């Protein structure tokens, strides 16, 4: 198999993952007679194209867990605006804040842009958020540089994670793809999970922003437990017994 072109190898990897449900890097090395570095680069490319999910040491089919939809296809916009309008109540002049990527955080950036802050510092790896806020007077925007993830409008990779870890901010506003009582907060992409985790570690207070449709779902990579956040801001739709359980974990729950 060593004479396959790169694109042919990528297609064959997807076929193998889908037929076997799980493959390892050493298996793929032997099959294609290429280096582990080549296989890992192939898997990164395929994951960025939403065709497989990387695991520790290999890959599984993309459909096996909740998938990561493109930002343009995301729904529940009215709920996200409500969540953003509540979240901004916790931002004060002179705050330093971290803003995660995603449509809910975009809605929060829009709220910030219209509220007349006179001294605010926003750190983000999201290109759209940076563009929303860079024209606003009295808001300093720090854009974390790195590779741009195609079709997602944010930077990612080890450089981003390292840069975020160098900051200490007052408040972090984080989004999630899924959360459940059993598994905490999770997302389909390994690198995205690592970025979210680094944001949580860099923030003195952590606000999780999510609409209720994400509850009861588990995605591939966990990035936070309930003990890692101070406040969950969510729209209506969570059963009362679940709210009680979440509060028992020491969370402040804000329902909009």
Image (spheres, rainbow, N blue to C red):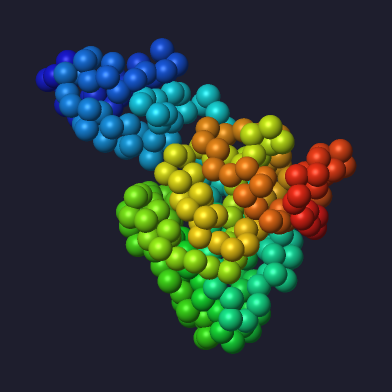
Up-down relation of residue 64 to residue 218 (above or below): above
Does residue 179 sit above or below 126 in this rendering?
above
Image quadrant for the C terminus?
bottom right
> In terms of depth relative to the viewer, which is nearer, 79 or 230?
230
Q: Split into 4 quadrants, where in the image is the N terminus?
A: top left
Q: Position of residue 52 (x, y in %)?
A: 41, 29
Front residue of 128/185: it is 185
Image quadrant where residue 28 sits: top left
Q: Position of residue 26 (x, y in %)?
A: 27, 19
Measured as percent of width and height from the top left, residue 113 is found at 59, 76
Judged left or right of residue 143, residue 207 is right
Q: Residue at x 47, y 79 (%)?
A: 140
| Any part of residue 128 in sight | no
Q: Is residue 20 above or below residue 97?
A: above
Image height check: is 254 above or below 6? below
* Residue at 23% across, 24% down: 8
Q: Residue at x 70, y 49 (%)?
A: 211
Residue 97 at x, y percent in the picture: 55, 69
């Amino acid at each position: 198999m060593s004479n396959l072109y790169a694109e042919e190898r990528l297609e064959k990897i997807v076929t193998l993952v889908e037929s076997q449900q799980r493959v390892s890097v050493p298996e793929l090395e032997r099959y294609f007679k290429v280096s582990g570095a080549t296989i890992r680069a192939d898997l990164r490319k395929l994951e960025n194209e939403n065709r497989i999910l990387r695991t520790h040491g290999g890959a599984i089919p993309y459909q096996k867990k909740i998938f990561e939809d493109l930002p343009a296809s995301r729904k529940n916009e009215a709920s996200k605006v409500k969540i953003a309008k509540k979240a901004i109540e916790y931002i004060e002049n002179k705050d330093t804040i971290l803003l995660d990527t995603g449509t809910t955080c975009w809605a929060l950036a829009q709220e910030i842009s219209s509220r007349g802050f006179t001294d605010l510092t926003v750190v983000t790896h999201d290109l759209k958020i940076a563009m929303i806020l860079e024209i606003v007077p009295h808001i300093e925007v720090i854009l974390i540089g790195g590779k741009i993830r195609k079709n997602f409008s944010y930077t990612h990779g080890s450089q981003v994670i390292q840069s975020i870890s160098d900051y200490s901010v007052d408040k972090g506003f984080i989004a999630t793809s899924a959360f459940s009582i059993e598994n905490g907060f999770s997302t389909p992409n390994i690198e995205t999970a690592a970025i979210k985790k680094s944001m949580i570690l860099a923030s003195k207070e952590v606000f999780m922003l999510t609409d209720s449709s994400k509850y009861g779902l588990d995605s591939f990579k966990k990035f936070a437990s309930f003990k890692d956040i101070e406040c969950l801001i969510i729209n209506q739709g969570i059963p009362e017994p679940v709210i009680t359980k979440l509060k028992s974990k020491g969370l402040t729950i804000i329902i909009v």
